Image (tube, grey):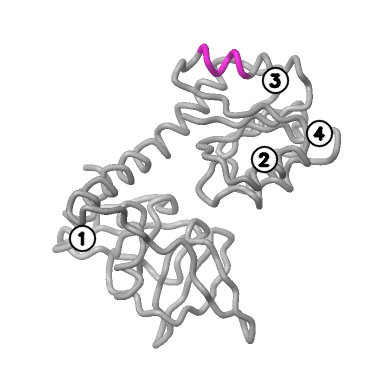
Amino acid sequence: MKVLILEDESLSARHLKNMLQSIDSSIEVVAVLDSVEACTHFLAASPEVDLVLMDIELGDGQSFSIMELLPGDCPVIFVTGHQEHALKAFKLNSLDYLLKPLNRDDLEAALDKFKNLYGQKKQLQQEYVGVRQSVHGTQVNQRTRYLVKCGTRLISISLSDVAYFYTKGKMQYVKTRNNEDFIIDKRLEEIETEVDGSTFFRVNRQFIVNYMHIEKIHTWFSGKLKVQVQPAAYEEIVVSRLKANDFKKWLGE
């Protein structure tokens, strides 16, 4: 697990780094940064980071501005002495919000949450890429962004920011993790062949969902499943009885 620490108090940074590695010796702290500016330059180089732990109040501003620079699937745990920012932190989809002085049990619980939510996804991605490479004998190039419409504007959005694709009426749409809806000039049949199959699944004729945005799954009548996503969909997402087994296998059953 590759971890980035953003903390401007050197003693707190050392304490956090030591506590992380004592909890899990496989954790690699890729960098310890002390400012928004330093973190901005670091992320511009597109380093591989699995998890970010950051304080909020830094010498040159608040770390909230860093959130928009992170890949859409990179979780953040805030470690701060300021209780009043908790609501904003969770609105930005942070994984957890820990208060100083940092408690080892709280940090360990937050890391367990990360492993439970993201560990399975990473394993599925690795297995999927391995299978595709063995079949094709080469690296598979998959789409990483799409061009979408917002009124008269065209916008390029990262696939990591997509919660799900859906159809409504005769139009196709993208729902982003920030609950924005954009028109996309591609049929779901085409999108299904372009996206990473370990992350996205075509649950029915109307929806292709992102694993990270599945909130709950309910058993439904006649062997069907009902999927609850976040942000919420405009209609209930039901997986047919015939497709339910494949969907459960994809989830890791």
Q: Is residue 218 or residue 45 the one in the foreground?
A: 45
**Which amino acid lies under the numbered mark 2 shown in the image of this protein?**
Phe
Which of the 4 image quarters holds residue 97? top right
Give whichever of discs 3 and 1 has the lower sequence position. Answer: 3
Q: Which numbered dot is residue 42?
A: 2
Query: Image point 42% across, 32% down: which residue?
Result: 115
**Which amino acid lies under the numbered mark 1 shown in the image of this protein?**
Lys
Label 1 – label 2 distance at C-alpha? 46 Å
Q: Which numbered dot is residue 224?
A: 1
Q: Residues within 10 Å of mark 3 (few under 14, many from 20)?
A: some
Task: Please provide percent x and percent y for residue 94.
Answer: 59, 42
Task: Give the extent of the magenta segment.
Answer: 17-22
Label 4 – label 2 distance at C-alpha? 16 Å
Q: Which residue is mark 4?
A: 58
Mark 3 in CB contact with mark 1 (< 8 angstroms): no
- Which element carries disc 2, helix, strand or loop? helix
Label 4 – label 1 distance at C-alpha? 50 Å
Q: Which residue is mark 3?
A: 13
- Which element carries disc 1, helix, strand or loop? loop
Task: Please provide percent x and percent y for residue 236.
Answer: 37, 67
**Which amino acid lies under the numbered mark 4 shown in the image of this protein?**
Leu
